[in-house]
Amino acid sequence: MPRKGSVNKRKIAGDPKYGNQMAAKFINSLMLDGKKSKAEKIFYDAFDVIAEKSGKDPLEVFLAAMENVKPGIEVRPRRVGGATYQVPMEVTSFRKQSLAIRWLLTAVRNRDGKSTKDKLASEILEAAEGRGGSIKRREDTHKMADANRAFAHYRW
């Protein structure tokens, strides 16, 4: 972190098949141990399963799922007079996207059985419909923020 000025966000190129930046970021997050080609294969195989199950364009289903998972508000700890309060705050667009990707992948990895491509396809389809583990995580975050609404005046 620099002492002066701010660091500019890097622009990443879109994914090879669709040219979509969100898909490229998702593939990068899905990747383990630097095996990008394996992550791409899992991602695109999951898209094939989504197209087969839903009959819709898999990229549109994926983008709808990501929009459904993005949180609008979250709680952040704020220390005031020796006490720490959970203060509800708006989420920036970059953080919304990061949280949505992280929650979706956590839900995929926590699912039982099957291959990763099947688990990923199922989670994306459920998230697009407003169900699933990642949606539950977003709802829990919103409930926590709602419960701590009384501390909103500590916002900075």
Image (cartoon, rainbow, N blue to C red):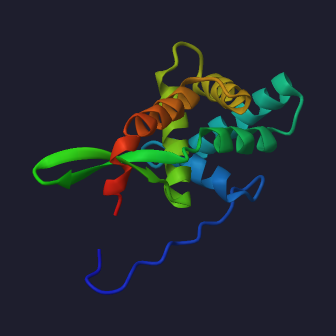
The relative height of residue 11 versus residue 116 in the rendered view (above or below) is below
x%, y% of residue 33? 42, 44
Can you see residue 55?
yes
The relative height of residue 32 versus residue 89 in the rendered view (above or below) is above
| Residue 100 relative to residue 33: left or right | right
Residue pictured at 84% horizontal, 26% vertical: 54
For the residue pair 88 and 31, the one nearer the viewer reads as 88
Residue lying furthest left: 82
x%, y% of residue 123? 63, 27
| Residue 105 relative to residue 145: left or right | right
For the residue pair 88 and 120, the one nearer the viewer reads as 88
Residue lying furthest right: 55
| Residue 18 relative to residue 100: left or right | right
For the C terminus, the quadrant is bottom left
| Residue 89 relative to residue 52: left or right | left
x%, y% of residue 22? 65, 54
Residue lying furthest top: 113
Can you see residue 105?
no
For the N terminus, the quadrant is bottom left
